Amino acid sequence: MIMKQHDSIRPITWQDDHLELLDQRILPGEYTFVKYTDAHAVADAIRDMVVRGAPAIGITAAYGIVLSARQHYGSQPENWFTAMQTDLDYLAASRPTAINLFWAIDRMKKRAAELQGDPVPALLAEAHAILEEDIAANHRMGELAAELIEAGSGVLTHCNAGALATGGYGTALGVIRSAWGQGKLTAVYADETRPWLQGARLTAWELLQDGIPVNLNTDGAAAWLMKQGKVQWVIVGSDRIAANGDVANKIGTYNLAVAAKYHGVKFMVAAPTSTIDMNVASGAEIPIETRDGAEILSLGGKRVAAEGAGTWNPVFDVTPAELVDYIVTEAGVVARPSLDKMNKLISRT
Ligand code: MRU
């Protein structure tokens, strides 16, 4: 397993015969791994956000498929591939926006279709490969993106696009780790990221774990932060990038892109090519998950909103390509994305 400077967190691990996930619902108060031995429970863990973040969801689903194959090969060795389909459907229904989930399920299904005899060793090797390739992609993105960042820059990030959201190192936080390691950053700001507080709970925790100082700000403070000249870059991850370069990411990302354009702050999206969905022409076709309004009505498990208030809780938004300065992937950097440039990038993979 690749480990570099400022890189100590691995949220998904396979231990002997089972999957373990770092429970992100209770971080940073508690650091606890939960054990999984069947695919249904893995899908529930994705839906309930024990694990979250696009690449991490895909990797987790891949291990879920290993568990499914083991169970069905054990009970019906002649028919395990067909018997797995219910689990694949249940995994695919866990969350709708991150394309990495469907990408990983497809890749595992294709591998499974090639196998004779006990499928578990080969499927486990494939899931390990997905995990290791993701970490390697994050390191590569970190290198490529750090070259774009001028020394003396302040950066703002949103949600958690870090080690916790990937196999390790992170996409946006991988870029920040690399740029910090090269001494290029004066300050790192993180939006708290209402309502689930991925920024306050997860991004702040993981950067501090790895010795990178972080300043939390409320989501509403971001435009004012830019106005003060404290940040030169907004750096975020993505759940799905459309063929034209439109970017779906955590709700509030679009606000940042609009504010960044107004203030002349550069806007970078760091994502592996497994996050690119060339089958959707534009962001308008990306399914946007809406979650329970209870996430907005309460904070830390305590009701804060007035009784009787209604809610609207879309948890992702789409930033149009015209507001994006750079998409950084492990296969290369796309400046001011367009369909033509995305096609060229994908043809290199
Ligand atoms: O709802 P979440 O926490 O799964 O949303 C995660 C994000 O929006 C991340 O920014 C995105 O998945 C990129 S993670 C490398």
Image (cartoon, rainbow, N blue to C red):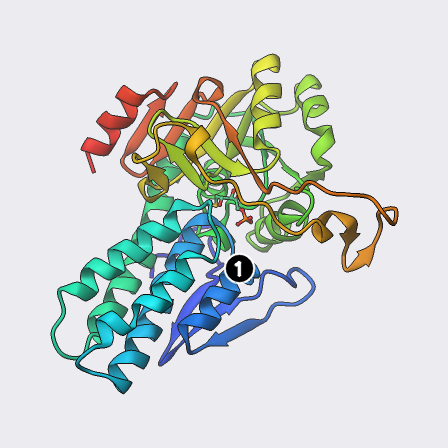
Residue 331 quadrant: top left
Nearest the viewer among 166 and 233 is: 166
Name the residue located 66 percent from the left edge and 19 percent from the top edge.
Answer: 229
Give the amino acid at mark 1.
Answer: Arg
Residue 120 visible somewhere in the drawing: no
Local SS, label 1: helix
The extreme bottom residue here reads: 75
* Left or right, 249 with reference to 295: left
Residue 149 visible somewhere in the drawing: yes
Q: Which residue is mark 1?
A: 47
Residue 265 quadrant: top right
Give how far across and how far down residue 198 sits, in percent: 62, 48
The tally of labels here is: 1
Q: Residues within 10 Å of mark 1 (few under 14, many from 20)?
A: some
* Left or right, 81 with reference to 56: left
Name the residue located 20 percent from the left edge and 66 percent from the top edge.
Answer: 112
Give how far across and how far down residue 128 sits, in percent: 30, 64
Compared to residue 172, the image places residue 304 above or below, namely below
- Say whether mark 1 is within 8 Å of ligand 1: no
Name the residue located 41 percent from the left edge and 76 percent from the top edge.
Answer: 38
Q: Quadrant of the C terminus?
A: top left
* Left or right, 18 with reference to 202: left
Q: Quadrant of the N terminus?
A: bottom left
Nearest the viewer among 43 and 31 is: 43
Name the residue located 49 percent from the left edge and 50 percent from the top edge.
Answer: 53
Nearest the viewer among 191 and 215 is: 191
Give how far across and how far down residue 228 sits, in percent: 71, 19
Give how far across and how far down residue 279 sits, in percent: 30, 36
Nearest the viewer among 177 and 265 is: 265
* Left or right, 98 with reference to 191: left
Compared to residue 151, the image places residue 71 above or below, namely below
